[in-house]
Amino acid sequence: MTRPLVVQTEELDDAAAAWLAEHCELVACPLADASRLDALLARADGVVVRTYTRVDAAFLDRAPRLRVVARAGVGLDRIDVAECRRRGAEVVHTPDANSSAVAEYVFAMLLDLLRPLHRLDAPLSAADWTALRRRLEAPRQLEDLTLGVWGLGRVGGRVARAGVGLGMRVVYHDLVEIPVDRRHGATPVDRDGLLATADVVTVHVDPRPANRRLVGAEAFARMRSDVVFVNTSRGVIVDAAALAAFCRAHPDARALVDVHDPEPIPADYPLLGLPTVRLSPHAAAATARAHANMSWVVRDVWRVLSGEPPAHPAPA
């Protein structure tokens, strides 16, 4: 019998790709090779994407036989889930694959800001040694701060748990009621209460259309003038121009931003060049383990192609 064809448009972990290739005809074809990709999609039963492939009506028109669309990752903002299902293609993803990696990165950025490491590479005199130690005295440490977690889901929950473990007071805001045993020691507050009291505001919400520009000028106006604002969720969640204006008006505030809209960032990106803003290149999930975890979405690809229900279907 002819094996089903699955097209891989972006990078997959070698072991996961090899596993799927044992079950299907797996062909890797980058988005840039448009003519070859069109020919493959015309007969593809499945497609595996990661970050930059947009699966919308135009894409689906090129792939009339699709039975499964697999996102090797968490966010589904580039996949029209409803349209895929309307055309008979199930959508699967890996909702918890990179949660620990992203939570780690939040604290890597915070600690680098609050307690930057100074590496010695030469001997110092006694006077220079004493002066350096005085210069490196940090004005704040984590247990002095209130951590505000906006969205207590898979990543936000891990961030809250880590914050509590490090002695921080942790508050959170979420649209749904979180059972006490899943709050990780964090205290629920309303949105305005979180923004007004948190020394650190870290955003962990999904990029559904209703959350686009969720954090804008009105939200920033309610934050402390010396807030540390962290975004590792999605670039579309935050109004970058409003954040830039807030940082210019409040020189004691700091912003740690890993995700952007668009990516890669253009020359006119509002946050470029601001001395109180640290930008990173969407690297929070960039660990070998997280990438491998995301790649194992291939198991759900095979489940769907075998007529079985997937373990991790996209939410409706």
Image (tube, rainbow, N blue to C red):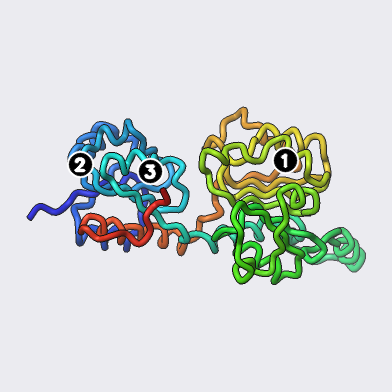
Say whether residue 300 is left or right of residue 195.
left
**Point 74% across, 52% down: residue:** 194
Identify the disc placed on residue 92.
Answer: none
Amino acid type shown at disc 3: Val
Tell whether label 1 touches label 2 (CB within 8 Å): no
Say whether residue 211 is left or right of residue 118.
left
| Pointer 3 residue | 81
Image spot of residue 104 (x, y percent): 60, 62
Q: Earlier along the polypeptide chain: callout 2 or callout 1?
A: 2
Say whether residue 189 is left or right of residue 153.
right
| Pointer 1 residue | 219
Kindly indicate the quadrant of the structure image that contains residue 114: bottom right
Amino acid type shown at disc 2: Arg
Please name whichever residue, 101 or 56, is drawn nearer the observer in this view of the structure: 56
For label 1, the SS is: helix
Report if residue 27 is visible in the image.
Answer: no
Please name whichever residue, 97 or 291, is drawn nearer the observer in this view of the structure: 97
Say few, some or many: other residues with alpha carbon within 10 Å of mark 1 (under 14 / 14 to 19 / 20 or more). Answer: some
Q: Earlier along the polypeptide chain: callout 1 or callout 3?
A: 3
Please name whichever residue, 193 or 35, is drawn nearer the observer in this view of the structure: 193
For label 2, the SS is: loop
| Pointer 2 residue | 65
Report if residue 7 is visible in the image.
Answer: yes
